[in-house]
Amino acid sequence: MAGAPRAPILLILFLCIIWTSTVMLMVTATSAESSSSVEENCTMMMKYKDPKQPINIRMKDLMSRMTLAEKIAQMTQIDRASATPEVMRNYSLGSLLSGGGSLPMTNANVEDWVKMVNEFQKGSLSSRLGIPMLYGIDAVHGHNNVYKATIFPHNVGLGVTRDPDLVKRIGAATALEVRATGIPYVFAPCIAVCRDPRWGRCYESYSEDHKIVQQMTEIISGLQGELPTNSTNGVPYVAGKNKVAACAKHFVGDGGTTEGINENNTVIDWHGLLNIHMPAYYNSIIKGVSTIMVSYSSLNGVKMHANYDLVTRFLKDTLKFRGFVISDWAGIDKITTPVKANYTYSVQAGISAGIDMVMVPFNHTEFIDILTGLVNDNVIPMSRIDDAVRRILRVKFTMGLFENPLADLSMVDQVGSQAHRDLAREAVRKSLVLLKNGNNTDSPLLPLPRNPNRILVAGTHANNLGYQCGGWTISWQGLSGNNHTSGTTILNAISTAVDPSTEIIYSENPEADFVKSAKLSYAIVVVGEFPYAETAGDNLNLTIPEPGLSTISNVCESVKCVVILISGRPLVIEPYLSSMDALVAAWLPGSEGQGVADALFGDYGFTGKLARTWFRTVDQLPMNVGDSHYDPLFPFGFGLTTQPVLGSS
Ligand SMILES: *[C@@H]1O[C@H](CO)[C@@H](O)[C@H](O)[C@H]1NC(C)=O
Ligand SMILES: *[C@@H]1O[C@H](CO)[C@@H](O)[C@H](O)[C@H]1NC(C)=O
Ligand SMILES: *[C@@H]1O[C@H](CO)[C@@H](O)[C@H](O)[C@H]1NC(C)=O
Ligand SMILES: *[C@@H]1O[C@H](CO)[C@@H](O)[C@H](O)[C@H]1NC(C)=O
Ligand SMILES: *[C@@H]1O[C@H](CO)[C@@H](O)[C@H](O)[C@H]1NC(C)=O
Ligand SMILES: *[C@@H]1O[C@H](CO)[C@@H](O)[C@H](O)[C@H]1NC(C)=O
Ligand SMILES: *[C@@H]1O[C@H](CO)[C@@H](O)[C@H](O)[C@H]1NC(C)=O
Ligand SMILES: *[C@@H]1O[C@H](CO)[C@@H](O)[C@H](O)[C@H]1NC(C)=O
Ligand SMILES: *[C@@H]1O[C@H](CO)[C@@H](O)[C@H](O)[C@H]1NC(C)=O
């Protein structure tokens, strides 16, 4: 809790309050110059509030006023569900977050989000020093928690596009949608280099190839704004009210764990670490990324949340990263086995390793009390606390949070805007990989004719927006159905694309006899994985779940078919490939299914190239491009192309 301010500051504050309350009365009787010089003298006393002061001066001034309690509070982040405006005022906590699916009472309109964030912020602003809190959220494929926000393809699809400028524009659109809800901070991008698709977070990774992940860090320039050329390397940057602070995650080696087990151990030598998992951090730091999140995983048996050598000595000292390091959700709790076995030890190990802000995320008093005790007992030196607070304040000052702590409703139309949906549609189309299109003796099936008499659209994923968006959409693990957000299902998109005279039969899982007798010109089968996130998505067999496989066989053995696979990663496909006339990997395309139809019917050609190796059998895993034993079904970089159909709409 805030300690008593020192007497001289109280006196100055008092004079300044007198000044502000009388200046309006005086202003008619006094010259403008003398009034403004009083104002200057007042703000000079509160240099940290003066935007004309250099950031270093403001930081120094503010830190000189802060008690230990206020400093430790800045290092504390809790979930909105555990916060109230009163807690924010009493403790002056540094940050709040919405965990996946942690939403305001109603998620129905953007105004509710703005109001919620502002209420918390008003609490923070009424604390002793009025330091604004920083609200963060997982906006990992668009502003994905928010009803009717534009949902972009997950990163696994964006890597396919090989288009960093597209990804930068997605970052800029996401920043606008996030700011529209009053939020200035996103826990994105995930710059994991997923080396094993059995990992449930593989779809959050742009590629198994670090070079593609490096290129895609361009999203940071979209989220935060383009770094000015005169900026100092490693210093965070956010261009203002239409941009958000970004977070590169998860430092480091998250995508390299044994068998792709989430949060497990990455066994790799120093050379491999620097060559595969580290490079995208260089690019992120060069682009002025504001924050970096630590990985739950271990590196050669050492928990990253307790890894002083990597977090402090390498990231901060060697790479000169000067933004702040944040833990993952309850990340320090997991330093011990079992989880939270000795929280005092966890706090000590995490803060000593170099974590600046802890995503607690529920019990702030417990965290604050323990860290305070560790400082008072000289276990953690004051210099470590000051380093953390300086980094947090630098981000807050840089992004203009002190000047613009509260959001207004002027940007609400940005959420799910047509321009952003058009951009997402472009991304969907460019993220598709055409893996098969007829065979050597037959003419290609794609692009599909638009005006056949009758076609079949089949599969669990054809008419399910929740499935096509995947995990991290409205809820943490994702949802099923069409009413959780708005967008275009692949079925809707197909009905828009074909001629009005074409009859579309839609059936999730039709019988083979029906398919044989239905006099179809062709069938489109849309199947794949059901939504998942993090640990729940780890999978050792990587098979297409039922009824997907039976739909493929019922349909494709009876009629010419194209299979659209909706998945967060390559799946076992070799045994079924011969029955398919065409196969498209669509990954997790998000809300704009029209992008799939755009390529199917030839408005645009297929251009995507695999950013992952497509294995034959799971016992080949891990298998990545460049490995000595490389025998993929479809190699990294593979992708058939088609030409757009001339004269198509
Ligand atoms: C402001 O401060 C300057 C220098 O400290 C002093 O000369 C001046 O009288 C002050 N002005 C007012 C209006 O207090
Ligand atoms: C906040 O502080 C006030 C005044 O000390 C106290 O009455 C109130 O219980 C505190 N509330 C919380 C949530 O800490
Ligand atoms: C960079 O240039 C801008 C515009 O000229 C200026 O406002 C800013 O202070 C400069 N920043 C640094 C770190 O020199
Ligand atoms: C990795 O997973 C195995 C199997 O579940 C488990 O026994 C082990 O403790 C995990 N290691 C880490 C570092 O999490
Ligand atoms: C918990 O960790 C602290 C700090 O390392 C240590 O002093 C204490 O002995 C530990 N407690 C137990 C019960 O192991
Ligand atoms: C927070 O942790 C403290 C100490 O372990 C405990 O006494 C308190 O009940 C916890 N508060 C909540 C809200 O869980
Ligand atoms: C090509 O596909 C047709 C059926 O569409 C099949 O009869 C033929 O055997 C295939 N040829 C090759 C070389 O796979
Ligand atoms: C969507 O529909 C399901 C089942 O009909 C219902 O439980 C859920 O509340 C609906 N969600 C929304 C956001 O309307
Ligand atoms: C594959 O693994 C997933 C995740 O563990 C499991 O739910 C599913 O039943 C498995 N499928 C098969 C065919 O073994």
Image (spheres, rainbow, N blue to C red):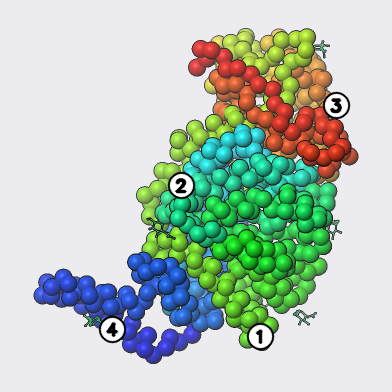
For the residues marked 3 and 4, what is the alpha-carbon distance in whole angstroms? 81 Å
What amino acid type is highlighted by mark number 4? Leu
In this rendering, which labeled residue sits more in front, label 3 or label 4? 4
For the residues marked 3 and 2, what is the alpha-carbon distance in whole angstroms? 45 Å
**Which numbered circle lies on residue 176?**
2
In this rendering, which labeled residue sits more in front, label 2 or label 1? 1
What amino acid type is highlighted by mark number 1? Asn
What amino acid type is highlighted by mark number 2? Leu
For the residues marked 4 and 1, what is the alpha-carbon distance in whole angstroms? 38 Å
Q: Which residue is mark 1?
A: 378
Task: Examine the rendered structure and indicate whether residue 331 appears above or below residue 253.
Answer: below
**What is the quadrant of residue 81 in the picture?**
bottom right
Neighbourhood count class around disc 2 (C-alpha, 10 Å): few under 14, some 14–19, many 20 upward: many
Q: Which residue is mark 4?
A: 15
For the residues marked 2 and 1, what is the alpha-carbon distance in whole angstroms? 44 Å
Neighbourhood count class around disc 4 (C-alpha, 10 Å): few under 14, some 14–19, many 20 upward: few
Q: For this rendering, which residue is in front, 30 or 571?
A: 30
Choose the circle earlier in sequence order: 3 or 2: 2
What amino acid type is highlighted by mark number 3? Pro
Q: Which secondary structure, mark 4?
A: helix
Neighbourhood count class around disc 3 (C-alpha, 10 Å): few under 14, some 14–19, many 20 upward: few
Question: Residue at point 41% right, 47% down?
Answer: 412
**Which numbered circle lies on residue 575?**
3
In this rendering, which labeled residue sits more in front, label 4 or label 1? 1
For ligand 9, tell me if the residue under mark 3 lies within 8 Å: no
Q: Position of residue 79 (x, y in %)?
A: 58, 63
**What is the quadrant of residue 554 in the picture?**
top right
Q: Which secondary structure, mark 3?
A: helix
**Which numbered circle lies on residue 270?**
none
Choose the circle earlier in sequence order: 4 or 2: 4
